[in-house]
Structures are given as structure tokens and as C-alpha cells.
Image: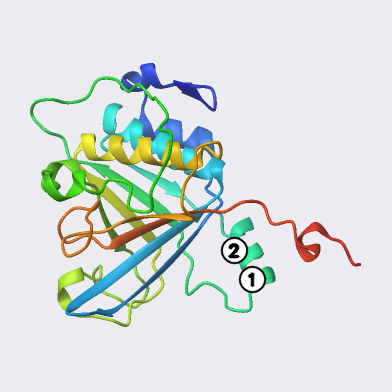
């Protein structure tokens, strides 16, 4: 599969990432975040919960930003998110907070800039999908980084190293890294969005101190695939 949503992966190098994102429309997903002490580590985490289609949208934006003509792009999140509504209707414990968008930034290396992308699905995904390779790779260039920006009431983005634990609702979840790291994340999300590929309920990417999968000074990143809700309330069944 090298074409998705009418987009040919082999032609991504000539596509303006921002124009491509505009053509895909807003995401329909939620962002949950939190933090606390885990043993001797002060950990902050971000969870992005999306349908299979929106995971594919994120993957396409990652590829376009890493290979295309723009090094940064922004994916808006619909204010009336279906997953947010489903969470509120189907759960007695709603999500902590909801994000407003995802910003993707690719660092431009002077050499070895990827020019194309070819996708071959995996057979199975684990919860820590890049372990044990992630323990020995070059984390600075081969792993993505996840942070927050645009937090209401804050003068600057909360950082992993400042000891803050009262993180407020983020407006923007940021995904950054070298193009190869973003391409690797895109490939992972394409695999995770394929329901024919066996996988755990979520996938987790950790920075130093865990099983890795995210670059230094990154938040822990969780991705959850949200299947359409079929409960009586969401289906409109009054019985």
C-alpha cells in the first residue's frame, strides 16, 4: 500500500505539506495528558486517541513534513470531536483534557534527506513497538520528540525538566524530530491503523529511563486507536 486517501506516497517530495493538510480537513481526536512520579523519575505523558482514519491523517502529515517542501505543518482538531463526545457519553470518568491541534516539525539535516517513502505493513505490533532496537539507536536523530505548547495561563511551554506537575490543558501537542524519525513514526501509525495487523490496545513511546521510543527530553507518548462506539446511547437506541 503506497497510496492512501488519494495521495501517492511516491510523490510526497513535491507536495506542500500545509496544502496537503488543508485538503484533509480537521482531525477528530482527543489529547489526554498528565504527569507524576514513577519511582525516581518525574514523568509527563501525552495520549493521542484517534480513529484509524485520523491516525492515517497524522501519518500522512508526518510524511509530507519529512519529505515534502515544508518543514513544519499544523493539524487542527475539531472542537466538536466525535471521540470527545463518545468519551463523555460512554465513560463515568472523562478525559483529563482535550487538545486543539498537533504541530509537526522536521529538523532539516544537511545530508541524507529522504526523497521518497515506501510502505510495507508489519505482521504484528507490540505495546513498545521499537524495543529493543530503541535502546541502542541514535536517539537524537532516529527517535521523535513529543512536547506541549500554547498552554493557557502559562508564559511558556511546560518542560519535562522544570519539575512542574500541575500541567494545564494544552492547545498544541508538538511532534518533532529529524525526517527519518518522523518517517519511522508515520510507518508505525500506518501499521497501528491497520485493523488486520494484530496489536496491543495501545502503543507507547518512552524517553530515557524507560524502554525508549522517544528522544531525549520528550514526554512519554501513548497512541490509542478508537473504534466507533456501538453502545445504545451513541447508536441512538432508546431501548
Q: Are marks 2 and 1 in contact (CB under 8 Å)?
A: yes
Residue toward you, 75 or 197 = 197
Whole-percent x and y of residue 88?
64, 71
* Residue 60: image tag: none
Residue drawn at x 21%, y 59% as measured from the top left: 207
- Is residue 69 among the parts visible in the rendering? no
Residue drawn at x 52%, y 44% as measured from the top left: 54
Residue drawn at x 10%, y 44% as measured from the top left: 138
Q: Mark 1 points at which residue?
A: 88
Q: In which quarter of the image is residue 116?
A: top left
Residue toward you, 120 or 141 = 120
Label 2 CA crowd tier, 10 Å (few <14, some 14–19, many 20+): many
Label 1 CA crowd tier, 10 Å (few <14, some 14–19, many 20+): few
Residue drawn at x 21%, y 80% as measured from the top left: 39
Position of 51 with respect to 35 (left or right) is right
The C terminus, quarter of image: bottom right
Whole-percent x and y of residue 152?
37, 73
Q: Name the residue under label 2.
A: 84
Whole-percent x and y of residue 15?
37, 23
Residue toward you, 147 or 188 = 188
- Residue 180 vs 33, above or below: the answer is above
Whole-percent x and y of residue 185?
32, 41
Amino acid at each position: 500500500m503506497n497510496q492512501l486517501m488519494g495521495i501517492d506516497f511516491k510523490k510526497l517530495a513535491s507536495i506542500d505539506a500545509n496544502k496537503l493538510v488543508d485538503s484533509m480537513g480537521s482531525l477528530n481526536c482527543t489529547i489526554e495528558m498528565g504527569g507524576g512520579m514513577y519511582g525516581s523519575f518525574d514523568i509527563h505523558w501525552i495520549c493521542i486517541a484517534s480513529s484509524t482514519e485520523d491516525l492515517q491523517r497524522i501519518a500522512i502529515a508526518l510524511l509530507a513534513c519529512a519529505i515534502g517542501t515544508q518543514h513544519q505543518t499544523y493539524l487542527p482538531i475539531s472542537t466538536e470531536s466525535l471521540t470527545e463526545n463518545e468519551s463523555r457519553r460512554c465513560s463515568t470518568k472523562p478525559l483529563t483534557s482535550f487538545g486543539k491541534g498537533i504541530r509537526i516539525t522536521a529538523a532539516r539535516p544537511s545530508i541524507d534527506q529522504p526523497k521518497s517513502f515506501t510502505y510495507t505493513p508489519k505482521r504484528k505490533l507490540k505495546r513498545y513497538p521499537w524495543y529493543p532496537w530503541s535502546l541502542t539507536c541514535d536517539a537524537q536523530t532516529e527517535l521523535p520528540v513529543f512536547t506541549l505548547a500554547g498552554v493557557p495561563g502559562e508564559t511558556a511551554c511546560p518542560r519535562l525538566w522544570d519539575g512542574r506537575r500541575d500541567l494545564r490543558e494544552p492547545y498544541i501537542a508538538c511532534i518533532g524530530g529529524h525526517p527519518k524519525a518522523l518517517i519511522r513514526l508515520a510507518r508505525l501509525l500506518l501499521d497501528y491503523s491497520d485493523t488486520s495487523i494484530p496489536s496491543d490496545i495501545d502503543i507507547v513511546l518512552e524517553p530515557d529511563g524507560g524502554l525508549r521510543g522517544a528522544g531525549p527530553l520528550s514526554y512519554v507518548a501513548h497512541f490509542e486507536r478508537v473504534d466507533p462506539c456501538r453502545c445504545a446511547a451513541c447508536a441512538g437506541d432508546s431501548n
